[in-house]
Amino acid sequence: MNKSLMELLLPRLAKRLQRHLRRYQAGKLSDAQFSRKFETLMQQQLHWLSNQGVPEPEAAVTVHSAMLVLSAAGLHAEAEEQKLPLEVVEHRAVVSAAEDVVRTYGVSRLRAIRQISSLVSQYSD
């Protein structure tokens, strides 16, 4: 693969996530249904990357990072709602994503946080 994983993954995720988000905002999906769709979408992308020969821990870091990049508007809204600096909300999201990677793949917590933070920083607007 010559393109970076994020450059391959972001357009794939963006289309699907946007479709689910529109349905959720229109009231066609409940919170639980949206959460299941979100999780299913992540799993599908993990499997796709694995089938492309990407090691699973690297695929998981990439998928989580891409989801955070695509969820930037939601993180901004959450920061405003909670009256917290955006950086605090973003950091919590990164740590949560890293914890999932650590739980599932047993990688170092600090390494997962650093990798996800780096990708999110690099690909965020």
Image: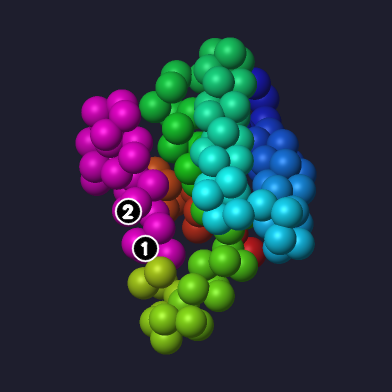
Front-lying residue, 36 or 67: 36
Q: Residue at x 65, y 36 (%)?
A: 9
Identify the residue position indicated by label 1 in the image. 91
Local SS, label 1: helix
- Range of residues picked out in magenta: 90-114
Residue 26 inside the magenta-drawn segment = no
Q: Residue at x 55, y 75 (%)?
A: 77
* Amino acid type at image mark 1: His
Q: Residue 116, percent across and down?
A: 42, 47
Residue 38 seen in this snapshot: no
* Amino acid type at image mark 2: Val
CB contact under 8 Å: marks 1 and 2: yes
Front-lying residue, 102 or 118: 102
Using the image, tell me which numbered label, if any, was put on residue 95: 2
Residue 103 seen in this snapshot: yes
Q: Does 120 sit above or below residue 41?
A: below
Q: Quadrant of residue 90?
A: bottom left
Q: Which image quarter holds the N terminus?
A: top right
Q: Is residue 108 left or right of residue 52?
A: left
